Amino acid sequence: MAESTPGSVHIAWYATGFRGDKFEVKLAEIAAVAARYGATHFAIYRSRDDRYRFLQVADFASKLDWERYWYGPEFEVFRTTCSSWYQVPVTYAWQDIVAVGGFTPSEAALVPVTE
């Protein structure tokens, strides 16, 4: 049974050789689709140390909303189109959201640095 409490999903992706840049574009596109399924936040992070390593993060009000996105038609097309662009298996982890905060980049530039 799917949980009805809010949470954050983290998916570790690893692109295959010479496909990192193309995979980044497609991953950004499919991440944005999460909003159609109720995601309140989504992000794609690309490692600076290993340019083939990506982390997809999406926050949902319920795990059922996440599963609708993950098993939805857009993600099926993504998996079919990009199946050779990443290593399998791909697993996700449902996380409880404990605290949230932050600034936009322009706001962060205004925060004084204290020593």
Image (spheres, grey):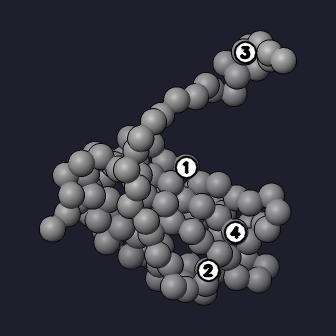
* Residue labelled with disc 4: 53
Left or right: residue 66 compared with residue 31: left
Q: Residues within 10 Å of mark 4 (few under 14, many from 20)?
A: some
The image position of residue 71, as x and y in percent, is 31, 72
**Which label is found at residue 86?**
2
Secondary element at tag 3: loop
Secondary element at tag 4: strand
Nearer to me, 15 or 29: 15
* Residue labelled with disc 1: 43
Left or right: residue 92 compared with residue 39: right
**Which label is found at residue 97?**
none
Marks 2 and 3 in Cβ contact (< 8 Å): no
Q: Nearer the viewer, mark 3 or mark 1?
A: 3
Mark 1 or 2, nearer chain start? 1
Q: Residue furthest left?
A: 1
- Residue located 70% across and 58% down the image: 46
Nearer to me, 56 or 81: 56
> Which quadrant would the N terminus be assigned to in this image?
bottom left
Q: Residues within 10 Å of mark 1 (few under 14, many from 20)?
A: some
Structural distance between the alpha carbons of marks 1 and 2? 18 Å
Structural distance between the alpha carbons of marks 3 and 1? 23 Å
Structural distance between the alpha carbons of marks 4 and 2? 10 Å
